[in-house]
Image: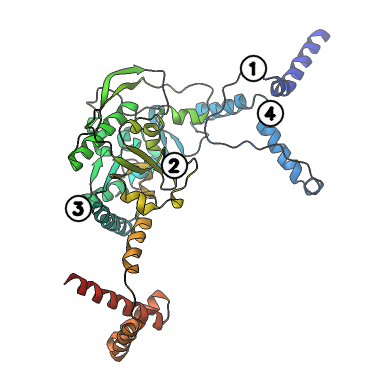
């Protein structure tokens, strides 16, 4: 009996001390955690932080994050949450029917729960139309590329708690209508993927990932190339695939949601297709300068070097914030570029968005670029102060007109004099515009 107790106590001690041993020796090879997280550095001791207790808190956090076997315990906790309660311990992840995985904002987008409003889209599309016409003068074409959304493609797997039968007006539906009505170049792969769903030879979407399949993005890129060729009346790189490998050995990013959940055991999934690509070109091949402004849907094409072999310049502006491409230094920000010069030197500007990020589309592009061109238009006029004062006096002498000035000033919460100046300048510029158009 004593011998059994000793063995039992020894096993308990081993369990308690094994994380320490693992931390020192890495005796057990563990699969690293996936996803976005930051490990705290070991805090530097200071008497001031020790007295306040801040040092102890930081050290506790550091120990918790660096304890041996931590990846195993995290995966064990996540597996229990998934298996027992169907809870995903990962941000925005939703477990759908038959364990199809979604990111929640794609579900909201499909159901119209994140609709920004008609006024917002009317203004954005109006500005985009203006920008498109300005850039067309420089032989630069803007193409809106609507990438597919997983919730639109797999609505039958959306959990019932979202009431999937109750759909409202969505950003996608209203934006598409406005783009078509304004004759803005557009490719709609959201609708195209749904149309191909039952007839496609290969899977267009993975079960446990959020992005389109390699096969799906190959079809999309091929269509984009043909669209560009039609707009410019040129012949670009002959791009396609010779064969397709179908395997359950999933490649990035076909299992990206499941990997981010950090489970002990894989969620069941089906085999995915991986085309073997070819690129044919000759001395007459046209390779355009392209700026693609988009979200993560473009990372795979850009990161694998596919678009670099098709475009003369493959410039990727991630969310219109960071610039990626051979001519940019690492960490280059779009705000540090001469945006107007970059846009006007490009052959195509591709504004790519999937349904899940349409509520952010086009990522500040239309506001900034619209301001660039309208400010330029305003700066070309030299204000004649004597003429402005004359117009102001004409307005003052008209009681009805000046009352309108007063009402607008109240509405904008500015002084009567500032409102008077604004209207006088506007009239002055309109007069100059009319004279220049004669």
Percent x, y of residue 335: 45, 52
Q: CA distance from mark 4 to mark 2?
A: 40 Å
* Residue occupied by mark 4: 67
User: Which mark's residue is nearer the viewer, 3 or 4?
Assistant: 3
Describe the element under mark 2 as helix, strand or loop.
Answer: loop
- Mark 1 vs 2: CB contact within 8 A: no
Residue lying at 37% horizontally and 41% vertically, measured from the top left: 315
Q: Quadrant of residue 199?
A: top left
Specify few, some or many for label 3: CA neighbours under 10 Å numbering under 14, 14-19, or 20 or more. few
Camera-side residue of 417 and 101: 417
- Mark 2 vs 3: CB contact within 8 A: no
Camera-side residue of 9 and 154: 154
Q: Is residue 409 above or below residue 50?
A: below
Specify few, some or many for label 4: CA neighbours under 10 Å numbering under 14, 14-19, or 20 or more. some
Percent x, y of residue 28: 64, 17
Residue lying at 23% horizontally and 39% vertically, measured from the top left: 228
Describe the element under mark 1 as helix, strand or loop.
Answer: loop
Describe the element under mark 4 as helix, strand or loop.
Answer: loop
* Residue occupied by mark 2: 328
First of labels 1, 4 by sequence position: 1
First of labels 4, 2 by sequence position: 4
Describe the element under mark 3 as helix, strand or loop.
Answer: helix
First of labels 1, 2 by sequence position: 1
Q: CA distance from mark 1 to mark 4?
A: 13 Å
* Residue occupied by mark 3: 181
User: Which mark's residue is nearer the viewer, 4 or 2?
Assistant: 2
* Quadrant (top left, top right, bottom left, bottom right) of the N terminus: top right
* Residue occupied by mark 1: 28
First of labels 3, 4 by sequence position: 4
Percent x, y of residue 250: 41, 21
């Amino acid at each position: 009996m004593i011998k059994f107790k000793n063995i039992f106590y020894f096993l308990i001690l081993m369990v308690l001390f094994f994380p320490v041993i693992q931390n020192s020796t890495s005796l057990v090879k563990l699969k690293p955690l996936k996803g976005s997280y930051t490990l705290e550095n070991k805090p530097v001791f200071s008497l001031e932080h020790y007295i306040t207790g801040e040092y102890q808190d930081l050290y506790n956090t550091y120990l918790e994050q660096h304890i041996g076997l931590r990846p195993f315990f995290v995966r064990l906790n996540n597996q229990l949450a998934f298996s027992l309660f169907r809870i995903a311990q990962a941000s925005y992840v939703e477990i759908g029917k038959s364990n199809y995985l979604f990111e929640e904002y794609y579900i909201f987008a499909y159901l119209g729960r994140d609709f920004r409003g008609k006024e917002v889209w009317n203004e954005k599309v109006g500005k985009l139309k203006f920008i498109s016409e300005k850039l067309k003068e420089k032989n630069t074409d803007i193409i809106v590329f609507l990438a597919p959304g997983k919730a639109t493609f797999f609505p039958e797997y959306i959990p019932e708690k979202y009431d999937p039968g109750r759909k409202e007006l969505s950003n996608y539906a209203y934006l598409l209508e406005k783009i078509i009505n304004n004759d803005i170049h557009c490719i709609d792969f959201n609708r195209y993927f749904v149309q191909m769903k039952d007839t496609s030879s290969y899977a267009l979407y993975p079960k446990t990932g959020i992005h389109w399949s390699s096969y799906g993005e190959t079809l999309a890129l091929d269509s984009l190339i043909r669209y560009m060729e039609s707009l410019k009346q040129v012949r670009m790189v002959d791009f396609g695939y010779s064969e397709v490998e179908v395997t359950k050995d999933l490649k990035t990013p076909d299992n990206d949601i499941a990997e981010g959940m950090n489970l002990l055991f894989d969620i069941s999934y089906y085999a995915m297709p991986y085309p073997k690509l070819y690129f044919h070109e000759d001395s007459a091949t046209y390779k355009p300068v392209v700026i693609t402004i988009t979200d993560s849907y473009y990372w795979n094409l850009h990161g694998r070097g596919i678009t670099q072999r098709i475009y003369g310049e493959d410039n990727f502006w991630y969310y219109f914030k960071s610039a990626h491409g051979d001519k940019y230094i690492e960490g280059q920000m779009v705000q540090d570029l001469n945006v107007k010069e970059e846009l006007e030197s490009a052959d195509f500007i591709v504004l790519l968005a999937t349904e899940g990020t349409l509520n952010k589309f086009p990522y500040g592009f239309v506001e900034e670029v619209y301001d660039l061109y309208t400010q330029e238009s305003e700066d070309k006029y030299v204000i004649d102060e004597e003429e402005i004062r004359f117009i102001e006096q004409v307005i003052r002498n008209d009681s009805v007109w000046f009352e309108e000035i007063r009402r607008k000033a109240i509405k904008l919460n500015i002084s009567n004099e500032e409102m008077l100046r604004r209207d006088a300048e506007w009239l002055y510029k309109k007069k100059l515009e009319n004279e220049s158009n004669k």
